[in-house]
Amino acid sequence: MHPGEGQIDFRRFVWQLKAAGFDGALSLESRAIDQEGQVEVARIQKSLQFMRELIAERK
């Protein structure tokens, strides 16, 4: 699953990193190729946008 899908609370995860003073790089891995061997560009872009918005949020 990609960030923004499923039940993982990425918002809470990002806020806990911020609360701890973390300001380094964040790296996540998700499957990028579907079962037919095609790169899921739109899905990757959606996940990246989701994470960028979470990181940019102010409490």
Image: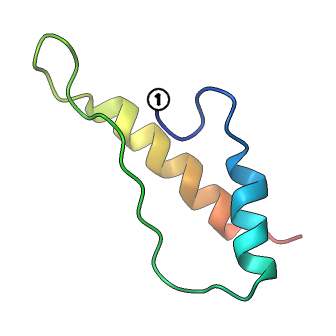
Asked if residue 40 is positioned above or below residue 15 in the image, the reply reads above
Residue 13 left/right relative to 24: right
Residue under pointer 1: 1
Residue 35 left/right relative to 26: left
The picture quadrant where one finds residue 41 is top left
Residue at the farthest right position: 59
Asked if residue 44 is positioned above or below residue 18 in the image, the reply reads above
Residue 29 rendering spot, x and y as whole percentages: 36, 49
The residue lying toward the viewer, choosing from 9 and 38, is 9
The picture quadrant where one finds residue 36 is top left
Residue 51 rendering spot, x and y as whole percentages: 56, 54
SS type, badge 1: loop
Residue 34 rendering spot, x and y as whole percentages: 22, 19
Residue 30 rendering spot, x and y as whole percentages: 36, 40
- The residue located at (51%, 50%) in the rendering is 49
- The residue located at (89%, 70%) in the rendering is 59
Mark 1: amino acid: Met
